[in-house]
Image (tube, coloured by chain):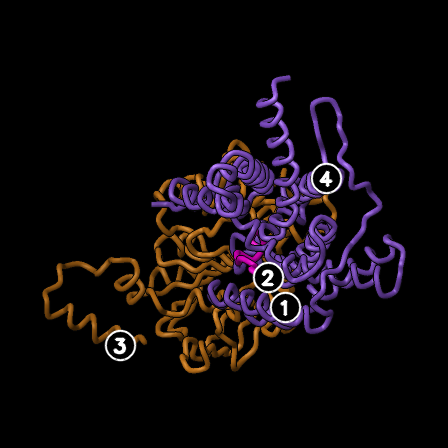
Chain colours: A orange, B purple
Amino acid sequence: MLVLNNIEVIYDGVILVLKGVSIEANEGRITTVLGANGAGKTTTLKAISGVLRTERGDVTRGSIEFKGQRIDRLRPHEVVKLGIVQVFEGRRVFANLTAEENLIAGGHIVSSTAKMRENMEKVYTYFPRIAERRHVIAGYLSGGEQQMLAVGRALMSDPNMILLDEPSLGLAPMIVEEIFGIVQRLRAQENVTFLIVEQNATLALEFADFGYVMENGAVVLQGPAEELRGNADIKEFYLGMSGDEKRSFRDVKHYRRRKRWLG
Amino acid sequence: MDGDFQFLFELVTNGILTGLMYSLVAVGFVLIYKSTDAINFAQGEFCMIAAIVVAGLLQLYDLPLIVALAGGLAFMLIFNWGLERVVLRPMIGRPIVAIIMATIGLALMFRGLGPLVFGAETQPINLPIPDDPVIWGPFFLIPIDMLGAGISLAFLAAFGWFFMKSRKGVAMRAVADSHQVSMAMGINVERYFALAWMLAGVVALLGGVVWGNAIGVDTQLAQLGLKVFPVVILGGLDSIIGVIVGGIIVGVVEALAAGYLDPIVGGGTKDFTPYVLMIIVLMIRPYGIFGKPIIERI
């Protein structure tokens, strides 16, 4: 459904951030992109949604295709019209608008107001907590509520695909479970395809169907989620399990050597 | 009625009316700020240009008032649309300070070009309303002030409704909140910028004509921009209600200063008291009486 074909992203004309990334997200699936800080995960999502150009970044090589159509030259609002919407890292709700106004803004591309209202009711059934707090200024909602609002706001545009950037960031484990639970329900009931960027690999691999691991602007590992869960390197570097016995300092050095090999 | 009280009453009512006319100009700042987060220092010059165009159409071509107004409206819409296209759109994403400096540059440019193109003599705009004050019970009112205040209230109510209730208004506020996130929500940010500038052109026309009728049309009219600045700061840069209340406060304070302080010190206090008030407000509530405090999660 969404295919990134060997894309290269350069910021400011000089800084090479993505060095040939190829990722595929299939319809009705949850695909996850794992990796440490600065690996290029968020840049990948921004390249898809088109907001990259507002940060003076540009896709200089390769192509991004959605349902067979090239989208890497489109402007962000055109990408949304095609059915892809991004949920930013750190929620980024419209802090000065009420929760409901956030949803109205999210449903901007739905031209019929009746349909927009209908979508809003749907969001409220998925997120009853937001329905309760609909007249509260979004900046005063709790972190969990804001994340739910951000997902709900994305849902307002009737998307085929949601790009979810670090939904677990700074939230309590219970809330995170709840949000991922809703992601699964959306996939099942609304047939929404997800591409999720996460640092929390345990969690992401638990919910995802397929996973990619990025390092230094390139994909270094990919496979079905259960396969990745079993992969020794993933276990060691991302899941925090290191086999049987405790490691000595010498092995930590060994870890760094291995890490370089991965990149 | 007691004479002193009558005097105070007159000062206050006329202050309110003048204040609402200030609001009409001040709302131009709010429209731009609400959608682009920048302060447009050329708003006073927009009023001047609009008034010059209308006065020109009236004097030179002897057109009926309604045609001249329509011509002025068309001119301002195209002018501001073009301005947004040529000067301001390329600056999207730049620091706000750069945009503000650009508007200051525009302001000075227009102030210089205005007399060069249209001549420096004061032109009248004569609206078909009487100059004689209306005496209505205890009120002693000037018709142009009443008309200005009425237009002001009507348009402010319309803008208030637009921003709070309509979907486009909500989208505009979303754009002001974050350009990047709005884009990612499918909002065509550039189009909303253009809309904001065009609306600012419309209020500039209204303000320019009303004030042009009151004080005549020349470059002095451009001073309105700075004149209403305390109104905007008092009310809060992003609040329509704030503009109304701020306008009324500034109008009344000016009128009271003119009525009570000027005879004592020999005049002139009317012109700076609003700024004193502005500075005091800035110290107590930097975001104005109705402005949005910056919400920050800690």
In the displayed structure image, the side of residue B84 where residue B137 appears, left or right: right
Question: What residue span does the magenta drawing correspond to?
Answer: B33-43
Q: Nearer the viewer, mark 1 or mark 3?
A: 1
Q: Could you give the CA–CA distance between mark 1 and mark 2, rounded to whole angstroms?
A: 8 Å
Q: Nearer the viewer, mark 1 or mark 2?
A: 1
Q: Nearer the viewer, mark 2 or mark 3?
A: 2
Mark 1, residue position: B110
Residue A224, quarter of the rendered image: bottom left
Q: Position of residue B35 (x, y in %)?
A: 58, 54
Q: Which one is earlier in the sequence, the residue at label 1 or at label 2?
A: 2
Residue A76, relative to residue B265: is it above or below?
A: below
Marking on residue A260: 3
In the displayed structure image, the side of residue A222 where residue A128 appears, left or right: right
Q: Nearer the viewer, mark 4 or mark 3?
A: 4
Q: Quadrant of the C terminus of chain B?
A: top left
- Give the residue type at disc 2: Ala
Q: Which one is earlier in the sequence, the residue at label 2 or at label 4?
A: 2
- Give the residue type at disc 3: Arg
- Give the residue type at disc 4: Ala
Marking on residue B154: 4
Q: Could you give the CA–CA distance between mark 4 and mark 1, rounded to whole angstroms?
A: 29 Å
Do the residues indicated by labels 1 and 2 lie within the same chain of the protein?
A: yes
Q: Could you give the CA–CA distance between mark 2 and mark 3, rounded to whole angstroms?
A: 57 Å
Callout 1: SS: helix
Chain to which mark 4 belongs: B
